[in-house]
Image: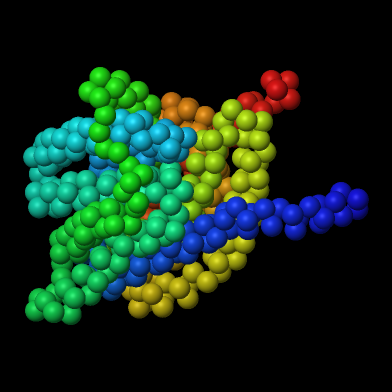
């Protein structure tokens, strides 16, 4: 009882500190912006699914599944690296100039590599050349959105960031609406893909109106830039591999469904994934608010305490979200006009996986903050290989349900290894 009373006495003081620091205001501002951005994206996807036939939707889901993979190549791990290196030196314009100039050179190199690899893959696999072009262009544009987002986060410009977040999805939805209303023919999968990949280009110039330009510098000495490129590339290669393996793991089921089953099966699984855009909000908000703090506390004894609090917070949020699975039948019937009842059990099987991802997400951020992207890359590789085996065992026989089961089971080994690493890292004997 005495501990409880002590906690109750301290609680108002903690709340007052958070209010005075602006943390709560920033958290709700960014969180609300993320909610709006995700809602706009969700409305876009629902609108698209309602426009397209099941066959056309399956083709769209298949091609759009490549976009996160290509985006990972276009980013080359820069968003995480920028926050790690930029957040501690926001007052040093010379170092800022060196870092930003170096990162831009890396971005252009990643774009060149992405263009060559995609062109070769398109020729070898005989894929649609227009779809390939749209995916490359869209991934490069989106990589600048995440690049600028990292700059906002590093400088703590959360109010401007809250304006920035919804803009790409707002442009997508507005263009889709006008295209649907004022085009004589019915929109097909390539029309939707073109809108989805190209619309965010309108947001890039807006960054320079939202961010205080006097805080940034974009140039530095040639030798200093060369050294910084080497340092960033060394860190980024593992961050890049971690992101690439993770994204491939997340989208792999769509590829194998397309291989073993029809476009309708791809559409059913892809439609089941759409409501999980709400979890993207939570992951993004946690990353924006927690990762910079973890990066600053890596040499402090408060690192473990702050990490523990974030895990408890994310676990609490996951528990609050459990009952929503009971509404899945009603949600799918209302959103998709009863076209995808077969997606409901797929969604229900995927739901616990996303809850567990929410619980374990702070540990992944902690590895980045500790400068351990190599371990993250290894974990993502384990996850990808597990998924590869399970996909080929379950999808041919069970279709979309097999894909959902493989997605869930494939992540368990990486979660166990991740938990074991931190339990070993913070053992009292090591301390």
Residue 200 seen = no
Q: Say how the picture is coloured.
A: rainbow
In this image, 129 relative to 195: left or right?
left
The residue shown at (15%, 64%) is 191
Q: Position of residue 355 (x, y in %)?
A: 54, 53
Direction front: furthest residue: 214
Q: Position of residue 299 (x, y in %)?
A: 59, 28
Residue 358 seen = yes
Compare residues 254 and 275 and report the one nearer the observer: 275
Q: Hey, which quadrant is residue 177 in on the image?
A: bottom left
Q: Position of residue 152 (x, y in %)?
A: 39, 49
Task: Tell me if residue 366 comes above or below residue 282 in the rendering.
Answer: above
Q: Hey, which quadrant is residue 421 in on the image?
A: top right
Compare residues 17 and 194 and report the one nearer the observer: 17
The residue shown at (9%, 79%) is 184
Direction right: furthest residue: 2
The residue shown at (41%, 78%) is 334
In this image, 65 relative to 425: left or right?
left
In this image, 10 relative to 342: left or right?
right
The residue shown at (29%, 60%) is 168
- Quadrant containing the C terminus in the rendered view: top right
Q: Position of residue 72 (x, y in %)?
A: 30, 41
Compare residues 37 and 105 and report the one nearer the observer: 105
In this image, 123 relative to 416: left or right?
left
């Amino acid at each position: 009882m005495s501990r409880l009373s002590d906690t109750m006495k301290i609680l108002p003081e903690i709340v007052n500190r958070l209010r005075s620091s602006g943390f709560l205001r920033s958290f709700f501002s960014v969180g609300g912006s993320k909610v709006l951005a995700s809602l706009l994206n969700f409305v876009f996807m629902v609108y698209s699914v309602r426009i397209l036939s099941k066959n056309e939707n399956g083709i769209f889901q298949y091609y759009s599944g490549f976009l996160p993979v290509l985006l990972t190549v276009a980013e080359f791990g820069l968003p995480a690296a920028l926050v790690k290196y930029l957040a501690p030196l926001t007052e040093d314009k010379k170092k800022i100039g060196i870092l930003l100039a170096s990162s831009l050179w890396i971005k252009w190199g990643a774009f060149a590599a992405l263009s060559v690899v995609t062109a070769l893959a398109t020729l070898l696999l005989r894929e649609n050349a227009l779809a390939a072009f749209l995916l490359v262009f869209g991934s490069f544009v989106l990589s600048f959105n995440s690049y600028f987002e990292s700059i906002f986060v590093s400088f703590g410009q959360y109010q401007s960031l809250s304006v920035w977040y919804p803009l790409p999805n707002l442009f997508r939805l507005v263009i889709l609406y006008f295209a649907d209303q004022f085009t004589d023919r019915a929109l097909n999968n390539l029309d939707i893909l073109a809108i989805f990949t190209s619309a965010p280009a309108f947001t890039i110039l807006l960054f320079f109106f939202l961010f205080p330009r006097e805080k940034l510098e974009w140039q530095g000495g040639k030798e200093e830039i060369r050294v910084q490129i080497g340092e960033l590339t060394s860190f980024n290669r593992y961050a890049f591999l971690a992101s690439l393996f993770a994204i491939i793991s997340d989208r792999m089921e769509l590829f194998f469904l397309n291989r073993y089953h029809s476009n309708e099966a791809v559409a059913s699984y892809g439609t089941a994934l759409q409501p999980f855009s709400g979890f993207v909000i939570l992951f993004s908000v946690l990353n924006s608010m927690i990762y910079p703090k973890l990066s600053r506390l890596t040499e402090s004894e408060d690192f473990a305490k702050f990490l523990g609090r974030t895990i408890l917070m994310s676990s609490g949020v996951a528990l609050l979200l459990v009952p929503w699975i009971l509404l899945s039948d009603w949600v799918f019937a209302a959103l998709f006009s009863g076209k995808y009842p077969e997606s409901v059990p797929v969604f229900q099987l995927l739901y616990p996986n996303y809850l567990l991802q929410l619980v374990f997400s702070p540990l992944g951020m902690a590895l980045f903050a500790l400068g351990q992207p190599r371990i993250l890359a290894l974990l993502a590789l384990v996850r990808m290989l597990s998924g590869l085996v399970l996909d080929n065992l379950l999808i041919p026989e069970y279709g979309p349900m097999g894909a959902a089961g493989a997605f869930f089971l494939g992540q368990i080994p990486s979660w166990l290894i991740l938990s074991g690493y931190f339990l070993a890292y913070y053992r009292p004997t090591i301390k």
